[in-house]
Amino acid sequence: MKRKASLRTLTNKLDGIFSRYIRYSHADGRGNCSCFTCDKVAPVAEMDCGHFVGRQHRATRWEEKNCHPQCRFCNRYCEGRKDVYAVRLVEKYGPHILFELQELKNSVVKLTPADLEEKIAHYKAKLAEFAPEKQAA
């Protein structure tokens, strides 16, 4: 009998698939994307999935408007360059986006293993549209 995956395992799997989806969905035809905060262009494999609202908030962790490709320097060493990130979010989605993400961040979200598995399947399918060879098992 196959053992059911833990919430942590499913969360990690979803994080990986979602991250690849965000990066590939912003990539050009050659597999490069630009950093949302500094405009550096690099292959998707060398980019991170940057979050404006931190990943500790489950309500925004997999919210597409909260996540964009970022170079590793901006995301890891400059704390996501939140000042520039905020300006770019407003330019892209309008002035309401910061309030929307703040409101969503404060909502309580409890996901079951079934919820996570559904999100994994959803983002696997979306990822396949951009990079069929990059799907996770």
Image: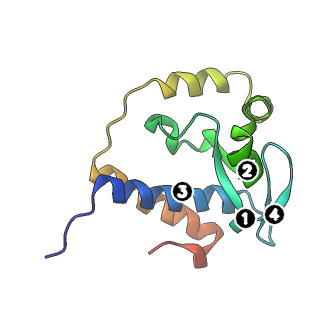
Q: Which of the two residues, 76 or 15, is positioned nearer the viewer here?
A: 76
Q: Earlier in the sequence, mark 3 or mark 2?
A: 3
**Residue farthest to the front?**
77
Label disc, if present, on residue 37 of the rendered structure? none
Q: Quadrant of the N terminus?
A: bottom left
What residue type is disc 2 on?
Gln
Mark 4 surroundings: few (<14), some (14-19) or many (≥20) residues within 10 A: some
Which residue carries the number 4 mark?
Answer: 42
- Say which of marks 3 and 4 sits in front: 4
The image quarter containing residue 77 is top right
Identify the element where label 3 is drawn. Answer: helix
Look at mark 1 in the image and give the residue it sits on: 46
Residue 20 at x, y percent in the picture: 60, 62
**Rendered view: 131 above or below 9:** below
* Residue at 47% in and 37% down: 56
Decide if residue 126 is in sight here: yes
Q: Quadrant of the C terminus?
A: bottom left
- Circle 2 residue: 70
